[in-house]
Amino acid sequence: MQAQRARFVDGAKKRGIAEKKAGPIFDLMEHFAGYGFPKAHSTAYAFLAYQTAYLKANYPWHFTAALLTIEAQNTDKLALYLAECRERGVPVLPPDINESQLPFTVEPNRGVRFGLTAIKNVGEGAIESLLDVRKKQGRITSLAKLCEDLDLRLVNKRVFESLAKSGAFDSLARGTPYADLPSLAFRPRLLAAVDAVVDYGARVQRDRNEGQAQLFGSFDGGEADQIESGAAMRLPEVPPWSEAEQLAFEKETLGLYFSGHPVDRFTASLKEFGAKTIGELATTPASPAVDKSWTPAGPRPIEADTSLGGIVAAVRPLKTRKGDRMAVFTLEDSQGNVEVVVFPDAFQRCGQLVETGTLVLVRGRVERDDETVRMLAADVSPLDTVRERLAREVAIHLRKPADRTTFEALGAIFARHRGDRRVSFEVEAGEAPHRLRVTVDVTAQIRVTPSSALVAEVERVVGAGAVELR
């Protein structure tokens, strides 16, 4: 640039422009060159922007498939764009070993199919091998048939586990005795069968390579035959997952919750409680400015006027200049996420709840600027306390009349959980079709505080599912 400066100044002087004026003019040009848009540059950007907007408006499914494929390895952006798909009404179909390709693809009249490339721990080589088997066999009907032709050097146990946890193997249940099983029960069975079917596939491929064809059919009596034989699946019986476990596995393998969200089961209670969703924060006015004055006891507490329920997605621990602990965390629900700031006073009371994966109810104030919205937390509490706060009565269902010992045990439990909510018993008596249900209100001297601990203790005495918070 110095050489160009000398040439510019010399040329200017030859044309009658003073050096004192030519120097500042070149300085302006040099500054503009740092990041300047000539007309050609601006025109190219405008043209590309128009093309992109046209595709997004007129071919939203194809645009979405391309965008999701580009960001497949960026979990944060993938979750952001999938949330936008929900907002814009673009259906996103789950990963499927029989339907998905390596990238995200468009299935006419159905939606955008999740690409296998976005499943964690599943490399491109493993995906290509899976697709080759699909070309050869047609629809994949079982893990055993898949392993007979799969390149097991590329597709190891970890790949199978990720595919099972993500739900990509769910379509294998079709046409089998497991077709009516919910994914909560089917996926853990597939996961339990992985070791046996991989061993079976390795034996079949080894014998094929050595020319030892099975003249009399499949292996007889082997471990894999007890799991699967050809297309007929016989999977180990293992306990089903809970909904929370399935969602956690989806988060682990896809980077996001796909079949639901951990907060979904609290939706009705949160609405009744008056809590907002994160999506509703966009239209929620900011709270009045925080009063930063001090009281004799210290900074004035934050006055809560908004409640949010969600799961802690990420935490950033911090310390003030005085060394007091505080935190900033990301709260997520099915509609998005928001930053929550927990100052030292609130952190001292509820910091133990600010851990990744914890379901919490945050009460605080909304703060916004031109680009962002965040919450200043006054209180953080377990999300399952919402139902307890709303409950006015603890109803206990008894399938048959209880004996004295049962009532004495319940009395001891009530004494440990004294509170202000009434207790009632619903007792079923007689046989169908003349069965009677009798409701008995307990004396006003016995009142309890609803909690998960109370429910657990009572159900240990009278049976699982016998307690209802009303």
Image: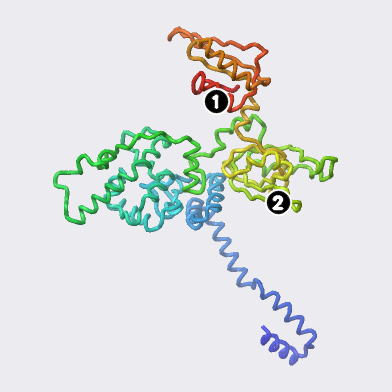
Q: Quadrant of residue 197?
A: top left
Residue 387 visible in the current orientation: yes
Decide: is 446 above or below 297: above
> Looking at the image, do the residues carrying marks 2 and 1 touch, with CB atoms under 8 Å apart?
no
Residue position for label 2: 319
Residue drawn at 63 percent across, 32 percent down? 271
Using the image, determine if residue 125 lies above or below residue 258: below
Pinpoint residue 276: horizontal percent, then vertical percent: 65, 37
Where's the C terminus, which quadrant? Answer: top right
Q: Identify the residue at horizontal 60%, vertical 32% (top origin).
A: 384
- Which amino acid type is shown beneath numbered disc 2? Lys
Lower sequence index among marks 2 and 1: 2
Residue 97 x %, y %: 37, 47
- Numbered label attached to residue 354: none
Q: Is residue 37 left or right of residue 80?
A: right
Q: Position of residue 308 (x, y in %)?
A: 65, 38
Q: Residues within 10 Å of mark 2 (few under 14, many from 20)?
A: few
**Residue at (49%, 40%) from the top-left corner?**
247
- Report the side of 53 relative to 234 (left or right): right
Alpha carbon separation for disc pair 2 and 1: 38 Å
